[in-house]
Each structure stands twice: as structure tokens, then as C-alpha cells.
Image (tube, grey):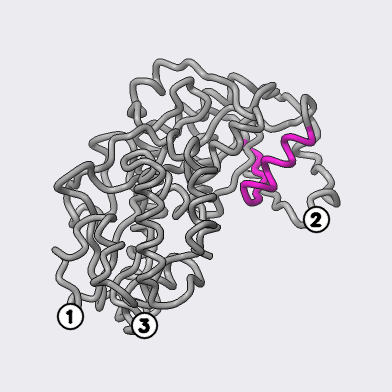
Amino acid sequence: MIQRHRLAAPLTALLASAAFANGALADELNVYSARHYDSDERLYDAFTEQTGIKVNILEGDSDQLIERIRREGEASPADVMITVDAGRLWRAEQENIFESVESEVLNERVPESMRHPEGKWFGFSQRVRAIFYNPDNIDPSEIGSYEDLADPNLEGDICIRSSNNIYNQSLLASLIEHHGAEGAEEWAQGVVNNFARQPEGGDTDQILGVASGECDVAVANHYYYVRLLKSDDGSEREAADKVEILFPNQDGRGAHVNVGGAGVVKGAPNHDNAIRFLEFLASDEAQEIFAYGNYEYPVVEGVKKDEVLESWGDFKKDGINVSILGENNPKAIRIFDRVGWR
């Protein structure tokens, strides 16, 4: 049975559970996870079934987990930390949480662009930052690239999340890499000028804003749209049917892709189990769970995907190493502040 525990605020009031206080046990693995998808339980169950290694899960948001590992120091029972977005993986890296891992399995299975150059973390699922639009009002040729979102012709048309959202920070970080800080700032200012409303809500709210007519164009991760298409709520499915998805920059560098990833924590008491777990996450079995459980794209080529993702076919992805998104994160935050993207 999986032992699951959730962090509760304030962090300083937390008490370590018995499952995490025991340190190294030959048949156990302690995972600190910022992913909160029920489907991930299938990952842990499958790993235990395959290896006999019991998985203990401590869940919290990324900043909580990073702070907890930092405070625990060398006494931390954490073996693996899992989180989403290269920006958050970079923050953990900056706190010296991850150790470099050399694994032939991981190097062979995980594309070079989806892993840290020094093996400090590996991406195991892909998330596309897509453009959504109202087909009655928008010609997709007008929004074929992220750069088009800054076109004055879209004034008052765009719904997008706030600048404190890590997904937007990483999108801007990619634009810094491709256009330089000055070009990226011009783009950010142009998007701010085109806001249909002040940023509010999550990715789903941006898509629903297009469906309701509050805006004609939105930016969101692709899997939020799939959730709406497959929702048990008829009104959500109806809203999704009013919206079309577009993968940007297909005539150029390709669509911006981010990752859900994990790394081995320095001083992991169950070090060998931790590496074995990361290698399992790169297996076809685990990759299919990512692809079906949360409608993410697998990082391993040839793995089966949900039928909606299959129906969209192949598309071009930005090939920059996702670690760059973290490196450019501080610049992106400063740019957002300067252009008034709140």
C-alpha cells in the first residue's frame, strides 16, 4: 500500500510521519511530489508491483517541498523530488537539492532536450503551451505563432494567466532565448496591450473565457483542454466544442514544450531505489500512464497516447533544452514586472 501524506501550512508546524522518519530501508522509497494527480498512484503501484519496493509519498507544492528538503538538510529522508515545469526544477537545482545521475537507461530513453545537461533532473512528460481561439471570430493564420499574440490587431482579444504563473514565466523564458531580453520584453508589452481582461484564474478559465465570448484568444497548456473535452459535465464539453486548439510556430522553431520531471535528492537514503524509480518512469509502462492519466505527451517516442492527442497528429516542438527555461526565469520575472503584466 502506498503511504501518502500532504503538507499543510505553515511548513514549520509540520511533523514528519513515521513513514518518513525511518530513513533508509532496503525495500522502500520516499518520494516528495508536487504532482497531485490521482493517476500518479498508478505509477507508484506499478513500480511497487514490478520491484517490490514500497513507495511513501509526501505531497505539497514545489516551494514547500524545496523548503522542507532544505531545512531537513543531510537528515532528509527524501529520495526523489517530482515537480512540474522546468522553472520549478531549476529552483530546486538552485537550492542544491539534486545530485547528478549517470544512467545509460535514462540517457537512452529521455531525449537530450528533456533532461538537465548534468543529469540533475529528467523530464518524463511533456506539456505544450498552446493557443486556443474562437473559430467564428479568429482566422488561425492570424495567430500562427506566439509572436502574433503581440499584434495590435488582437487588442482586447487575449485571455491569459498572471505573470506569477510558472507556465507563463517559462514561455517568456523561451522567447528570451530566441529573441533576446529586449525582443521578449517588446512581445510581453504587446500581449499586455491586447489583454481582454486583467489576468485571473487558471488555464481552464482562459479556455472558458474564449467559449463564453469574453475573449477570442487564450493561452493554456494542452491537457486542460482535453479535460474539458472529456469532462463528465456536459456544459464543460459544450464549452470546449466552441474552442479550437492551435500548436504555434509550426513554420519555425515549433511549439513551446515544458516538462514534468524528477531528480534524485542529494544524500538520498535509498539511493539505488531512487535511480531505479527514475528509470522506471522512462519505461513504456510509466510513459503510457503519463499519457493517459493526465493527457500529457510522453517523452519517449512511440508510446501510445490518449485518442484525443492521437487525433491531433504530430507537430513540431521547440528543440531547445528545457533547462534553459529555468536559467532565464529571473529575467522573465523582471520583464513581466516592467511591462505591468500582473
- Residue drawn at the location 68% of the way across and 43% of the way down: 65
- Residue drawn at the location 62% of the way across and 21% of the way down: 271
Q: Amino acid at mark 3?
A: Glu
Counting from the top left corner in percent of width and height, residue 167 is at: 45, 53
Residue picked out by circle 1: 136
Residue 56 falls within the magenta-colored stretch: yes
Which residues make up the magenta segment? 55-72
Please say whether residue 106 is visible from this viewpoint: yes
The answer for how far apart the CA atoms under marks 3 and 2 are is 37 Å
Q: Earlier in the sequence, mark 1 or mark 3?
A: 1
- The image quadrant of residue 300 is top left
Tag 1 and tag 3, C-beta contact below 8 Å: no
Per the image, label 2 sits on a secondary structure element best described as loop
Q: Which mark is residue 194?
A: none
Foreground mark, 3 or 2, reads: 3
Foreground mark, 2 or 1, reads: 1
Residue picked out by circle 3: 214
Counting from the top left corner in percent of width and height, residue 115 is at: 42, 29
The answer for how far apart the CA atoms under marks 1 and 3 are is 14 Å
Q: Amino acid at mark 2?
A: Pro
Residue 58 falls within the magenta-colored stretch: yes
